[in-house]
Image: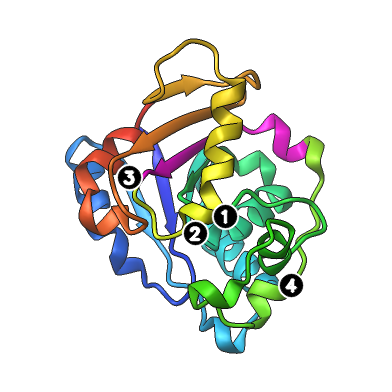
């Protein structure tokens, strides 16, 4: 039995994951979700600590940690802090954090103004994340690309990079050249947990 912990992005709430959790729980999986503290009045470090505390409180190891959008930074920071408790990282239509960069940095490096997408200059989005790349590389990871995402300008390059590395021609599910990454595509917009919960749950539960 797997244990899934879901982390929403931005100012989203844990309720976003209710339908996905229901599908997984109907198949005997254990799930949990967390609402992060208000990003206008907290930091990325705060959010990482909140998730670490939730994991410590449930006394579970081998957690499948799922992060949507901005939460990719949170789950990466958590995995860097307590890697021994993380079985897999699952990035849902997000950027992929780079050591020493913030979410705003990732936008700027891509030549994109965060304001174009309504991303405010709040502390969690401007705080730089530092992590041990060797630690994160060892953890199995999955990336779920929503092909109708409102953030395609940001995520389409990630998709292209995975496709370049891919072995074989099945783009729905592909093991990349890095055996610790799996790549999936979902026929959905950015809010796939609300609009395509069953399909998302099916992908998340892939071995």
Looking at the image, tell me whether mark 1 or mark 3 is earlier in sequence order.
3
- What residue did someone put label 3 on? 30
Sequence-first disc among 2 and 3: 3
Tag in front: 1 or 3: 1
Residues tagged 4 and 3 counted as in contact (Cβ below 8 A)? no
Kindly report the distance in space between the C-alpha atoms of the residues bearing marks 2 and 1.
6 Å
Which residue sits furthest top? 168
Front residue of 133 and 64: 133
**SS at badge 2:** loop
The residue carrying pointer 4 sits among few (fewer than 14), some (14 to 19) or many (20 or more) residues within 10 Å by Cα, namely some
Mark identifier at residue 127: 4
What SS does tag 4 mark? loop
Who's the residue at 20% across and 50% down the image?
A: 22
Image: magenta residue range: 135-147
Cα separation between marks 2 and 3: 23 Å
Residue 101 sits in which quadrant? bottom right
Q: Is residue 130 above or below residue 66?
A: below
Position in image of residue 14 (x %, y %) = 36, 67
Q: Which residue is mark 2?
A: 69
Q: Position of residue 41 (x, y in %)?
A: 60, 89
Residue at image coords 82%, 45%: 132
Give the x, y percent position of residue 187.
Answer: 28, 41
Q: Would residue 69 be seen by someone viewing this image from the given angle?
A: yes
- Spatial separation of the CA atoms under disc 2 and disc 4: 16 Å
Q: Which mark is residue 72?
A: 1
State the CA–CA distance, disc 1 to disc 3: 21 Å
Q: Are marks 2 and 1 in contact (CB under 8 Å)?
A: yes
């Amino acid at each position: 039995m797997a244990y899934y912990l879901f982390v929403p992005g931005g100012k989203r709430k844990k309720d976003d994951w209710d339908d996905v959790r229901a599908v997984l729980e109907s198949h005997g999986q254990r799930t949990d979700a967390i609402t992060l503290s208000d990003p206008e009045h907290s930091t990325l470090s705060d959010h990482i600590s909140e998730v670490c505390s939730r994991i410590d409180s449930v006394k579970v190891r081998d957690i499948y940690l799922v992060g949507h959008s901005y939460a990719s930074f949170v789950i990466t920071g958590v995995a860097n802090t307590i890697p021994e408790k993380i079985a897999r990282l699952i990035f849902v239509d997000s950027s992929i954090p780079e050591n020493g960069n913030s979410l705003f940095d990732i936008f700027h490096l891509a030549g994109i103004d965060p304001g174009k997408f309504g991303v405010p200059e709040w502390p969690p989005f401007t705080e730089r994340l530092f992590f041990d790349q060797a630690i994160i590389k060892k953890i199995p990871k999955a990336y779920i690309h929503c092909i109708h995402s409102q953030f395609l300008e940001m995520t389409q390059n990630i998709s292209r990079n995975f496709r370049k590395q891919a072995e074989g021609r099945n783009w729905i599910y592909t093991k990349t050249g890095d055996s610790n990454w799996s790549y999936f595509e979902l026929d959905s917009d950015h809010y796939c947990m609300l609009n395509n919960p069953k399909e998302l749950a099916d992908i998340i539960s892939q071995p």
